[in-house]
Amino acid sequence: MFFASDNASGASDKVLAALVEANAGHALPYGADPWTAAAEKGLQELFETDCAVFLVGSGTAANALALAAASPAHGAIFCHADSHIANDECGAPEFFTAGAKLVPLPGEKGRITLESFQAGLKRFPRGLVKQVQPSVLSLTQATESGTLYNLASLKALCDEAHGAGVDVHMDGARFANALVQLGCSPAEMSWKAGVDILSFGATKNGTLNCEAVVVFNKMLARELVFRRKRAGQTLSKSRFVGAQMCAYLEGGHWLDLAIQANAMAERLAVQLKEVPGVRLPWRTEVNEVFAILPHKAHLALKMEGAVYYDWGSRGLTPEEAPREDEIFVRLVTSFATTRNEVDRFAHIVREVLA
Ligand SMILES: *Cc1c(COP(=O)(O)O)cnc(C)c1O
């Protein structure tokens, strides 16, 4: 019952097989190999546009490089207060941008609202020399609270950003999980909505260590080849990263993996919701279930070896916050989660609270 995070899973069989296959023979290093070229072409076809693609080895690298490409050192990068870039990357975005300021914005259930973004923009007037200058709006899809921006709200936020001379970055660590839930095309959830630069995650959804910076606004791609090398992310055996991405995309494998992950979360949510004493503060939209559990259930689960994180009270309103005898937890499923694990988890909760 491993629900700590989706990166606790291994890689999919198809991705592993592709790595073994790519291991045969020799190939030129640093991306001059057929696998890297095929991965770039695959992403261009997927996004139905002539985007620039930069493969990297971690999501933090993808985010930090994307933000550095889009923001000057004196820029303001607007993000959600709970965002990964603001909380989980050890200052990499600030470091790679040579000091741009992350401006955390409030917003319920992990989402930045148009109003909170507008209020953020107001605090940093264009041209006022004592303030950093609005440069990037960073949106996480799916959000850190496992919620989604629908296409209309994505477009509204991107329009507002562009109107203010601000580029839009999307942290798509869980891009696939969001996409299969919204049922739209990759293009619709990115550049057609107004996203300029995307961190396209694959690691959490079945690759080993493979992420991509996908650049739709070509102006932002100009220096990235140098920035990536300087960041130590131009991998000499890039063929293995390329091979992972190719296998991930081939025949819609990435969508199948995300559908499985989301289905397991849905299965878990449906069962937990029905247990008296368990509260789910918001709808499960992707592969993350957020639940307020009585402490008694938490103890029983831990005793049975269930693994997941205490989520504090992130994303909750004061009224929803856990009481003294409760705990707010995040339960993440992945392509490797089984029905058996889900059902056993729910069974333990049901039994102890009966
Ligand atoms: C996991 C994750 C990342 C990438 O993290 P790495 O550990 O650097 O690969 C980025 N953004 C979000 C929202 C994530 O959940």
Image (cartoon, rainbow, N blue to C red):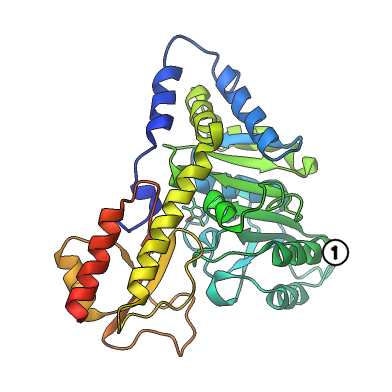
Q: Look at the image and tell me in which quarter the C terminus lies.
A: bottom left
Residue 41 coordinates in the image, percent (x, y): 66, 28
Q: Taking the image as drawn, is residue 317 in sight?
A: yes
Compare residues 95 and 57 and report the one nearer the observer. Answer: 57
**Farthest residue toward the left?**
303
> What residue sits 21% from the left and 81% below the top?
353
The reply, left or right, for residue 312 in relation to residue 305 is right
Label 1, on which residue? 163
Compare residues 280 and 204 and report the one nearer the observer. Answer: 280
90 to 44, vertically: above or below? below
Q: Quadrant of residue 118?
A: bottom right
Compare residues 344 and 2 and report the one nearer the observer. Answer: 344
> What residue sits 81% from the left and 68% below the top?
129
Question: Assess mark 1: CB under 8 A from ligand 1?
Answer: no
Query: Mark 1: which amino acid?
Result: Gly
Compare residues 311 and 177 and report the one nearer the observer. Answer: 177
